[in-house]
C-alpha cells in the first residue's frame, strides 16, 4: 500500500501532461487561419517548399489573432486593413491593385477598414528543395551554396479572355528553362479567380544563374512577345536568410 500515493501522483502527472499536450496542439493549430476561416483562405498549391493561398477579407470583416509564415502577397484588389499585432500595437496597411508585398513571419489580427473587399494571392515560404539546404551545416560547402540561392517570384498579367494564349506561352518556357544548369525550381501557377493572372515560382543556384536565364533566346523572345501582346511582367527576387547555429 505504500506505493499507492506514488502511483496516484504519477497517474495525475501523466493525465496533466496529456491534457497540456492537447491544449498546446490545439493552440498551435488555432494560429493557422486556413481552417479557422475557410471562406477567406483557399489553398491553391501546397508542397514541402511553399503554400499558395487565395486570400480575401471582405469590407468590415475581421479575423482573430493568427500567424503567417514569411510570405509574398500579390494584391489583386487594393485594400486598407488595420492590423493588431501580438504586442497589442496597431498598424494600418493601404495598398492598390497590382502591389507586391513581402512580410516576415507575423502574428496579427486584421480588420478591413477600407471601402473594398481585400483580395490577393499569398505565397507562404516553407523549406527549400530537398537536399538543397542543410540547416546546421555551418561553413560547409553545402551551407555556403545554400546562402547563394536566389528565389524569384514573377507575376504575369495577361488580357482578359485571352488567358489560354498566355498560359500556352508560359508553359512552353518550362522545358528549356529547367534544362538550364542553374535552375532548381521553375513552376507556374494560375489564379482561380482571375484566369489572366499567373505567378511563376523559381529557385536559382545564384544571382548569376538568373541573369544568364534572362539572356537566353527563349526568354528574350518571350519578353518581346509579352510586350507586343500587352502582357505585364513583374519579377521580385529574394535571398535566403541563413539560420544561426545554436
Image (cartoon, rainbow, N blue to C red):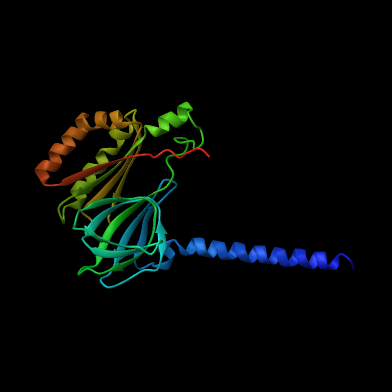
Residue at image coords 46%, 26%: 141
At which x and y percent is residue 26?
53, 65
Q: Say which residue appears at 42% left-offset and 67% top-offset.
A: 36
In the visual, does 246 lie left or right of 202? right
In the image, taking residue 5 as reference, residue 185 lies left or right, namely: left
- Where, by quadrant of the figure, is residue 224 drawn? top left
**In the picture, which quadrant includes the N terminus?**
bottom right
- Relative to 210, say whether 235 is above or below: below
User: Is residue 136 depicted above or below 191 in this figure?
Assistant: above
Q: Residue 4 appears at what percent x and percent y?
A: 84, 68
Residue drawn at the location 45% of the way across and 36% of the way down? 133
Residue situated in front as seen by the camera: 78 or 41:
78
Towards the viewer: 237 or 89: 89
Q: Position of residue 246 (x, y in %)?
A: 53, 40
x and y, in percent, of residue 160 in the image: 16, 56
Left or right? Give the position of 77 relative to 30: left
Q: Return the residue nearer the eye: 142 or 215.
A: 142
- Residue at the outermost left position: 228
Kindly tell me whether residue 192 is visible in this rendering: no
Amino acid at each position: 500500500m505504500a506505493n499507492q500515493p506514488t502511483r496516484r501522483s504519477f497517474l495525475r502527472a501523466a493525465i496533466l501532461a496529456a491534457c497540456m499536450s492537447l491544449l498546446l496542439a490545439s493552440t498551435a493549430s488555432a494560429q493557422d487561419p486556413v481552417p479557422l476561416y475557410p471562406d477567406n483562405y483557399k489553398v491553391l498549391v501546397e508542397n514541402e517548399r511553399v503554400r499558395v493561398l487565395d486570400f480575401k477579407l471582405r469590407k468590415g470583416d475581421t479575423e482573430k489573432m493568427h500567424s503567417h509564415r514569411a510570405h509574398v502577397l500579390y494584391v489583386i484588389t487594393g485594400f486598407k486593413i488595420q492590423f493588431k499585432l501580438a504586442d497589442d500595437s496597431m498598424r494600418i496597411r493601404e495598398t492598390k491593385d497590382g502591389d507586391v508585398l513581402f512580410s516576415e513571419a507575423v502574428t496579427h489580427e486584421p480588420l478591413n477598414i477600407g471601402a473594398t473587399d481585400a483580395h490577393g494571392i499569398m505565397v507562404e515560404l516553407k523549406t527549400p528543395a530537398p537536399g538543397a539546404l542543410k540547416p546546421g551545416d555551418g561553413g560547409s560547402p553545402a551551407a555556403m551554396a545554400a546562402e547563394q540561392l536566389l528565389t524569384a517570384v514573377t507575376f504575369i498579367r495577361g488580357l482578359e479572355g485571352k488567358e489560354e494564349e498566355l498560359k500556352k506561352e508560359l508553359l512552353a518556357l518550362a522545358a528549356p528553362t529547367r534544362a538550364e544548369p542553374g535552375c532548381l525550381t521553375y513552376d507556374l501557377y494560375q489564379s482561380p479567380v482571375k484566369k489572366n493572372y499567373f505567378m511563376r515560382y523559381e529557385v536559382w543556384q545564384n544571382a548569376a544563374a538568373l541573369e544568364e536565364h534572362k539572356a537566353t533566346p527563349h526568354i528574350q523572345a518571350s519578353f518581346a512577345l509579352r510586350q507586343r501582346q500587352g502582357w505585364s511582367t513583374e519579377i521580385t527576387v529574394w535571398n535566403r536568410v541563413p539560420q544561426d547555429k545554436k
